[in-house]
Image: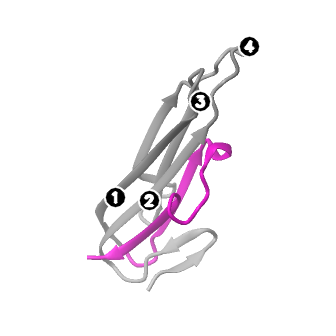
């Protein structure tokens, strides 16, 4: 199966894999005395391979959030797709907006399985 090295999943054998990831962000309503500032939230699954000398985005989501006056907010980002991967490829994630992550096993996850 997969192993973990330097916060990356190492692909055990070449083949087609379904890669998936989810993050959930939340925040509070802003104070009536404050000026709301838009927040940039992003989540990306990246591939690092011997075929490329840099991290290649495989799956990516971005969102601008404009906090409301009355209501707290909650936004999720999920993606998943099938990819041809090579033994030794490394899969990792990058997230912008980390202070707003809802950290629990059911809201933030990342993985892959062979098809």
Q: In this view, does 12 lie to the left or right of 108?
A: left
In the image, 45 versus 70, the foreground residue is 70
Q: Choose mark 1 or mark 4, whichever is in front.
A: 4
State which tag comes first along the sequence, 1 or 2. 2
Q: Distance between the residues labelled 1 and 3?
A: 24 Å
For the record, the magenta segment spans 86-115
Q: Nearer the viewer, residue 115 or 57?
A: 115
Q: Distance between the residues labelled 1 and 2?
A: 6 Å
**Quarter in which the C terminus is drawn:** bottom left
Residue 80: mark: 1
Single out the residue that lies furthest toward the front.
70
Q: CA gap, disc 3 to disc 4?
A: 18 Å
In the rendered image, residue 89 lying in the magenta stretch gets the answer yes
Determine whether 73 is above or below 12 in the image.
above
Q: What residue would you read off at disc 2?
A: 21
Is 18 above or below relative to 75?
below
N-term mark: 1 or 4: 4
Residue visible at 45% across and 53% down in the picture: 56
Q: Residues within 10 Å of mark 2 (few under 14, many from 20)?
A: many
Q: Is mark 1 on a helix, strand or loop?
A: strand
Q: Which of marks 1 and 3 is nearer the N terminus?
A: 3
Q: How far apart are marks 2 and 3 (CA)?
A: 21 Å
Task: Determine the image quadrant of residue 37.
Answer: top right
Asked if the residue under mark 4 is in contact with the one under mark 2, i.e. CB atoms within 8 Å, the reply is no
Residue 10: x %, y % from top left: 49, 76
**Residue drawn at x 64%, y 47% as measured from the top left:** 98
Q: Mark 4 points at which residue?
A: 33
Residue 39 — which label? 3
- Callout 1 touching callout 4 (CB < 8 Å): no
| SS of the residue under disc 4 | loop
Which element is circle 3 on? strand
Q: What element carries label 2?
A: strand
């Amino acid at each position: 199966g997969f192993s973990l090295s330097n916060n990356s999943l190492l692909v055990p054998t070449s083949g087609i894999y379904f890669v998936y990831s989810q993050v959930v962000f939340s925040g509070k309503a802003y104070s009536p005395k404050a000026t709301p500032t838009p927040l940039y939230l992003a989540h990306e699954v990246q591939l690092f391979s011997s075929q490329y000398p840099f991290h290649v985005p495989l799956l990516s989501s971005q969102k601008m959030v404009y906090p409301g006056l009355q209501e707290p907010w909650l936004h999720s980002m999920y993606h998943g797709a099938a990819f041809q991967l090579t033994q030794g490829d490394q899969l990792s994630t990058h997230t912008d907006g980390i202070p707003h992550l809802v950290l629990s096993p059911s809201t933030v996850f990342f993985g892959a399985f062979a098809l």
